Image (cartoon, grey):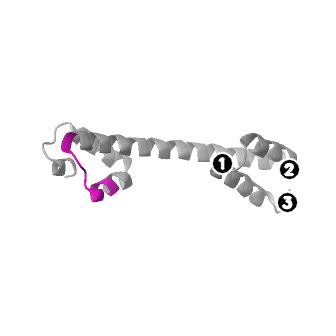
Amino acid sequence: MPGGEAELVAICVYLLELREAKPELVERFIHEYMDEETMKNFISIEDKLRAQGKAEGKAEGKAELLLSLLTARFGDIPTSLRWRVSAAAPAERDAWAIRVLTASQLEHVFR
């Protein structure tokens, strides 16, 4: 499918990301309209998107867990700290989670 391969892959990825189409319909579409090389590219992109989604879900789960631990230990957490936890890099979040165990004040977790 010269000239339209990228567009076709983009449409399929878009449909799968939005969950607007049933995966089996997208798969049937792929098999009908994609040549073997395009299909390999699509599957590679799909695998990357799944891995990315899994990593994002894991990071969100860790942020939620950290916020739960902070709340259990220190009470209400200011919105600014909630945003900071949500936006933090994974390594930083992990360090904070360990500090929750020994910090006597909320501020000590984020030093």
> Which image quarter: residue 65?
top left
Mark 3 / mark 1, whichever is N-terminal: 3
Identified at 31% across, 53% down, the residue is 82
Q: Is residue 23 above or below residue 111?
A: above
The one of 23 and 45 positioned closer to us in this rendering: 23
Residue 69 located left or right of residue 62: left
Contact between labelled residues 1 and 3, with CB atoms less than 8 Å apart: no
Q: Is residue 103 above or below residue 2?
A: above
Closest to the camera, between mark 3 and mark 1, is 1
Disc 3 marks a residue whose amino acid type is: Pro
Which residue bears the numbered disc 2? Answer: 33
Q: Which of the labelled discs sits on residue 19, or is there none? A: 1
Which residue bears the numbered disc 3? Answer: 2
Residue 74 located left or right of residue 4: left
Identified at 21% across, 45% down, the residue is 75
Q: Cα distance, mark 2 to mark 1?
A: 20 Å
Mark 3 / mark 2, whichever is N-terminal: 3
Identified at 76% across, 40% down, the residue is 24
